[in-house]
Amino acid sequence: MSSAGVPRHSHRHAPVDLCIVGGAGHVGLPLGLAFAAKGLSVVLYDLNEDVFDRLQQGRMPFVEYGADAILPHVLDRTLFLSSDPGDVTAARIVLIAIGTPVDEYLNPKLRGLLELIETLRPHLRASQTLVIRSTVYPRTCRQVKAALERDGQHWQVAYCPERIAQGHAIKELRELPQLVSALSDEALATATTLFSAIAPRVIPVSVEEAELAKLFSNAWRYIQFAAANQFYMMATEFGVDFNRVRAAMVEGYGRAATLPTAGFAAGPCLLKDTLQLAAFNNNNFTLGHAAMMVNEGLPGFIVEGLRRRYDLAQTRVGILGMAFKADIDDTRDSLSYKLGKILRFHGAQVGYSDEFATDPTFVSKEQLVQSSDVVIVGVPHAAYRTLAIPATVDVVDVWGVVRPGASL
Ligand SMILES: NC(=O)c1ccc[n+]([C@@H]2O[C@H](COP(=O)([O-])OP(=O)(O)OC[C@H]3O[C@@H](n4cnc5c(N)ncnc54)[C@H](O)[C@@H]3O)[C@@H](O)[C@H]2O)c1
């Protein structure tokens, strides 16, 4: 907003097919691009005007492969930016894609979405269809509808959870079937037509099935990563290279082929959604909590291994990769930061590098290698596969991506 409280971005309340609330975010923005590229008129509504300033110049605010090519073709033609809530009113369909985090005590922040509905309420009309895209705590969609219907009118509410892998949304939105559910036939028909515009097919389910399908999917991935990470810890303690064990397991043996590589299972979704499910099930989610202990314990395991071999107070440790996963720039809930914190606690001098995320304290990967006694791979950015690391530098590479021993 300007100092006078005037929104910096507005579509001047012109009618559009779709308004995405949270449209500057990692889910809302690529989704808006996908719909706008198919010719729907889309307003991205968000409070983050700095991101919109950047978008208005034709620049993506974060790494999302394929998005830079679409943005200039749709901006100000079928895609519009707005921080003016009046633009929410002017849309036929309002899609909600705001964050749904857990709090500092790992409990779901249930009120966030309901509070958003209260805030938006003066700008919503019962003739609109509300499509919830954020990942929600089970039963939230019915609560949203109940909250809206306190005015005695019938509201159209659908739930169509996002399932993309961040960074690959543009490709996956074209390829993935969309789970579509709603609390009325009319809302189901609207949501089905909407997502049929971008997806190869839609899968109709009940709202409760969709809520669980989304949370189970993320918890399942999180548990799979935990299995690989626990095997990694066992093999390492046993003096065996887990990546060689895994390669032997999966080669020509389909039943083991889904075993992921070991590595930090981080980011804003997997742990958070596992914990939403645990809270939903009265904290009775043994596998989910066990997965959290393993995945969140990996940085500490790495540091303990180093403490047996080094006096960390006399050791320079470099962390290669600060993003939460490979080849993107998002550092939200990255375990590389936790790793750095534990190393610093033990007195190590810690350096940081990333190929995508920017920070004035980061150095280049080459500088990091040159100025470290030990290098730990935090995330397997593709650029690290060809990084030459001299034999004098000790490498901890849970992922098995770098080639230690190569001369610079
Ligand atoms: N990031 C992913 O890969 C991914 C994948 C699948 C599902 N999800 C789910 O999608 C949801 C959004 O995640 P995200 O990663 O895009 O979050 P994000 O933080 O990147 O984006 C959320 C956006 O909402 C905006 N916002 C917050 N409050 C607002 C308000 N009151 N009015 C207008 N805008 C507001 C923020 O400014 C931000 O731009 C979450 O529920 C998440 O669990 C995320």
Image (cartoon, helix red, strand yellow):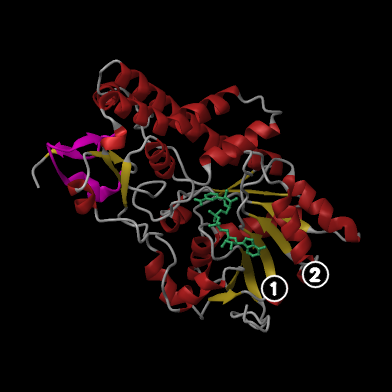
Sequence-earlier tag: 2 or 1 = 1
| Foreground pick, 31 / 402 | 402
Q: What kind of element bears circle 2?
A: helix
In the displayed structure image, the side of residue 192 where residue 220 appears, left or right: left
| Foreground pick, 188 / 284 | 284
According to the picture, the residue beneath numbered tag 2 turns out to be 122
Disc 1 marks a residue whose amino acid type is Pro
Residue 9 is one of the magenta-drawn residues: no
In the displayed structure image, the side of residue 334 where residue 90 appears, left or right: right
Regarding residue 348, the answer to whether it shows in the image is yes
In the picture, which quadrant includes the N terminus? Answer: bottom right
State which region is magenta: 380-404
Residue 400 position within the rendered picture, expressed as x and y whole percent measured from the top left = 26, 34
Location of residue 156 by image quarter: bottom right
Q: Residue at x 34, y 43 (%)?
A: 379
Residue 246 position within the rendered picture, expressed as x and y whole percent measured from the top left = 29, 25
Residue 394 is one of the magenta-drawn residues: yes
Contact between labelled residues 1 and 2, with CB atoms less than 8 Å apart? yes
Disc 2 marks a residue whose amino acid type is Pro
Residue 258 position within the rendered picture, expressed as x and y whole percent measured from the top left = 38, 29
According to the picture, the residue beneath numbered tag 1 turns out to be 85
Q: Is residue 265 above or below residue 124?
A: above
Q: Residue at x 67, y 78 (%)?
A: 15
Location of residue 108 by image quarter: top right
Where is ligand 1, by quadrant? Answer: bottom right
Instruction: Decide if ligand 1 comes within 8 Å of the CB at mark 2.
Output: no
Q: Is residue 167 above or below residue 389?
A: below
In the displayed structure image, the side of residue 231 where residue 282 appears, left or right: right
Q: Is residue 76 above or below residue 37?
A: below
Q: What kind of element bears circle 1?
A: loop
Q: Is residue 372 above or below residue 228?
A: below
Cα–Cα span, label 2 and label 1 = 9 Å
